[in-house]
Image (spheres, rainbow, N blue to C red):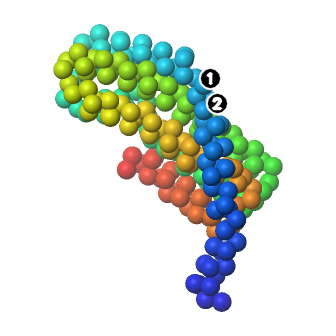
Amino acid sequence: MSFGDWIKQQLASCAPAGQEVVPAGKDSVLAFWACLRQDWAFFGICGIIVGVLRGLWPGGFEYAASLPQQLFAGLVSSAVLGVFLFAALVFIGLSSLLPRDFLLGACDQAVLRVRQFASVMTAFLAGYGLIALIRGAAQGLPLGQELKSVALYVFIVPVFCVIFTAPVYFRGRLCRLLAWVLILAGLLGMALSATGI
């Protein structure tokens, strides 16, 4: 059997997963929303408080840098979230290759922690971004541009969370080729996140 035939055979065995992409995405969105509903009030208020304190503190808001950089600089670590996201992919892939109870449990825990961490970050950044918008408007910065910057960083975390945790829908039943792809992508992503590339 040639390599091309082997790939075709592997893809044919993965075909049923393609039919369940929409339910997997919907499941991931609903699971993230359930976490966010619990976190938005408390962590959103925390973001507002930190935004106000940074605005009152000398040199708290310096608009020389772009607002997205201001949002992430010194507040939350995108590298930590990246490692969590990619570790979840590794566990999802491993739980399909070796459907053992401890791996299935580790997979569930990794995905739950990713959703919780992403939910906290999203709520915090939304509150912080609101204060940054108000401060930017008070200083005469273009509101549309600042709004796009805040929206980008508030919504990018949930989007990545939903995409990277959707494969857990197939936990323990992904075809071998897709499981290996997730593991390799996860390991590469973890290495890049940890090195800050």
**Displayed quadrant of residue 182:** bottom right
Q: Which mark, by number, is residue 38?
A: 1
Give the residue displayed 75% in from the left and 56% down from the top: 172
Provide the secondary structure element on which disc 2 rests. Answer: helix
Q: Is residue 189 above or below residue 162?
A: below
Q: Is residue 138 above or below residue 91?
A: above
- For label 2, the residue is 34
| Residue 44 in the figure: left or right of residue 62 | right
**Displayed quadrant of residue 17:** bottom right
Q: Report the quarter where the N terminus lies.
A: bottom right
**x and y percentages locating residue 102 in the rendered image:** 78, 48
Query: As rendered, which of 102 and 92 lies closer to the eye?
Result: 92
- Residue type at numbered disc 2: Ala
**Contact (Cβ within 8 Å) of mark 1 with mark 2:** yes
- Residue type at numbered disc 1: Gln
**x and y percentages locating residue 78 in the rendered image:** 44, 38
| Residue 147 in the figure: left or right of residue 12 | left
Q: What is the crowding at mark 1: few (fewer than 14 residues within 10 Å), some, or many (at least 20)?
A: some
**x and y percentages locating residue 175 in the rendered image:** 70, 65
